Image (cartoon, rainbow, N blue to C red):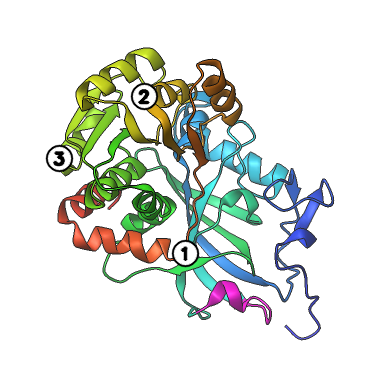
Amino acid sequence: MLGMSRGDRFGTHRVLEPRGTLPQAAWRLDNDLTRMFESELLLEVEALNIDSASFRQMEEANPGTEGVAQQILETVAQRGKQHNPVTGSGGMLVGRVVQIGSEAEPAATGIGVGDRVATLVSLTLTPLRIERVRSVHLRTHQVEIDGQAIVFASGALAKMPSTLGEKVALAALDVAGAAPQVARLIKPGDAVLVLGCGGKSGLLASLAARRSGAGVVIGIERDAVAAAPAQRLGAAHEVLIADATRGVEVAERAVAAAGREFDLTISCVNVPDAEMGAILATRDGGTIYFFSMATSFTRAALGAEGVSRDVTMIVGNGYCPGHAAATLKLLEEEPVLRKLFEERFG
């Protein structure tokens, strides 16, 4: 690494277009990984975990494993990263550390060359090069590849745990911000609504709400199959079958089930146009936590204004301090949750 350039800890030196932006906002990144910088870690990538909204969009646009694989290859070839141009979202990855620059230690605290790690930053800001796609798993949204990626000094990594299966841990770490952030939003006795309660983030959010003292937790899912995991987990007092995009109907049914409007609504749906159900179900002065890449914050802001609803709306930030350890601990402490993740992702 002697003689390597320093680079910028946020990765702006990898931005090709448009210049002056940060890597996540950039259209195209430099993914020539034969040239390294001191502020970077190099990973040998084994698998991508594509976020739910992005994977669903790719499946609908070009169904089947080959169709999804081709879209990923095209996106990375065009943009130097897996940044879905339709949904604007990415996912995260798992791989092995190959090289750590001398100024990249902040991202690599407790991690060394040879360690198997998961990235805790989005693929939308991760320089990525794919040599080949080995397999696409439609049910789990995981894609096995041969490739390399860069993590910048400002990024975050988690060492893969030995107590959980790799695919299970990867799935949980992909939504690691959900449970700890919900836990710090809850007040004892709160009425909580979880839209999309049967997905991985919905399960974690529901359980965090129940463990944090919510008075009532109501879940919403699109059909009986999607609702089944939430019903098995038992964190929600009631799970309703409803279309989250039908805002008035969803709100009326959820409020009737809870007996009051909600103090906190968590949206984990992977389809667009679900903002109004969350807004209409939440009381004035309440909070909505949009933990979904399918959310339009323009629709949410204008929608709340249009129905004169005074709610605090929070963007689902996938990071908070200690989120990876907290989420993995939740899986270790809750055997039903762990079983659900193992059945789906193991």
Q: Residue furthest bottom?
A: 2
Q: Which mark is residue 184?
A: none
Please tell me whether mark 1 sits on a helix, a strand or a loop.
loop
Q: Residues within 10 Å of mark 1 (few under 14, many from 20)?
A: few
Q: Position of residue 293 (x, y in %)?
A: 51, 37
Q: Which mark is residue 281?
A: 2
| Residue 196 shows up from this direction | no
Q: Residue under label 1, please give it.
A: 321
Q: Position of residue 242 (x, y in %)?
A: 29, 19
Tell me if 346 is positioned left or right of 282 in this view.
Answer: left
Q: Residue under label 3, please give it.
A: 232
Q: Is residue 107 magenta?
A: yes
Q: Nearer the viewer, mark 1 or mark 3?
A: 1
Q: Residues within 10 Å of mark 2 (few under 14, many from 20)?
A: many
* Residue type, mark 3 in image: Arg
Where are the magenta residues, as a range?
100-109
Task: Say which label, 2 or 3, has the lower sequence index.
Answer: 3
Q: Position of residue 140 (x, y in %)?
A: 36, 43
State the residue at coordinates (56%, 52%): 122
State the residue at coordinates (34%, 69%): 161
Task: Say which label, 1 or 3, has the lower sequence index.
Answer: 3
- Quarter of the picture holding the N terminus: bottom right
- Mark 2–mark 1 distance (CA, rounded to whole Å): 30 Å
State the residue at coordinates (34%, 59%): 327
The answer to which image quadrant residue 162 occupies is bottom left
Q: Position of residue 341 (x, y in %)?
A: 26, 50
| Residue 185 shows up from this direction | yes
